[in-house]
Image (cartoon, rainbow, N blue to C red):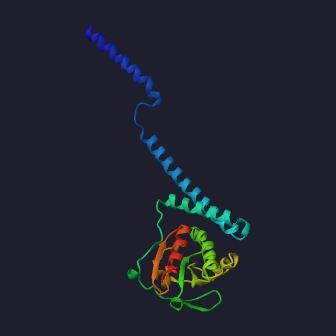
Amino acid sequence: MEKNNDTNLNQWVNDRLGSLHPDEQWRPNAIRGFARLQEQRDGGRRRRRRFAWIAAGIAATVVFCLAFPATRTLAERYASACVNLWANYTGSHGKLEFMKQPDRKIAPDFTLTDSTGAQVRLSDFQGKVVLLGLWDTQCTPCNIEIPWFIEFQQRYKDRDFAVLSIALDKDGWGSIRPYIEQNRFNHRVMAGNENVAHLYGDSIPTALIIDRAGRIAATHIGLCMKREYETAIESTINER
């Protein structure tokens, strides 16, 4: 009887396993697992591409809206949203922090030619607070910050303040000149080179706030919040 019961039990197990076999659901399937992993990776790439297009679209909207005073407030809101999206996507968002005055270093000097053909030397601006920005026309975070720099020049120009821009486009004035005309720059723009880029770390966007003694009061590499710039500029201007 025991042997007969064992036979029946074995037959029942085999029948159950046999009924599952056609579906292959009961056993690991390496091919199916790799296919699902590939689907997940492809989905991640598609999400990154979508985000890049969204960020570029927001930046274009900001630049367009800033051309019209009636839409300036709306444009600034879009810009702030874009900053937050970018920070969340990259997983990092630095801040523009001050150096204590005794710890500040002299900003590396340079001489470059601006869009009018005039020579610009950084050391000639001692006595003023300078916002020095390094960027290029194809950089999405740079395109977000440029309208702010234009606004800062207008707002603080009567307080011993100046914005200087160094554009690092590889084709030089071929890209830079149409860009500054389109965006109606109100400050001096120079075409940079590799030597100048090396002085400030070879990253864009890079922004420095330089005090009246020609020392670096604050620096930031990457996309910064507008309010952080405003706080740093005003604090440096108010230093005595």
Image height of 113 relative to 94, above or below:
below
Q: Position of residue 56 (x, y in %)?
A: 62, 63
Q: Position of residue 10 (x, y in %)?
A: 33, 18
Image height of 70 relative to 17, above or below:
below
Which part of the image, by quadrant, shows the N terminus? Answer: top left
Which residue is pictured at 41% across the width and 83% down the height? 105
Residue 148, visible in the rendered structure: yes
Q: Residue furthest left?
A: 2
Which residue is pictured at 42% across the width and 38% down the height? 29
> How many numbered discs?
0
Question: Of residues 122 and 32, which is closer to you in this image?
Answer: 122
Q: Position of residue 138 (x, y in %)?
A: 60, 71
Q: Position of residue 207 (x, y in %)?
A: 51, 76
| Quarter location, residue 145 | bottom right
Which residue is pictured at 46% across the width and 79% down the height? 217
In the visual, does 137 lie left or right of 2?
Answer: right
Residue 61, visible in the rendered structure: no
In the visual, does 35 lie left or right of 189?
Answer: left
Image height of 19 relative to 146, above or below:
above
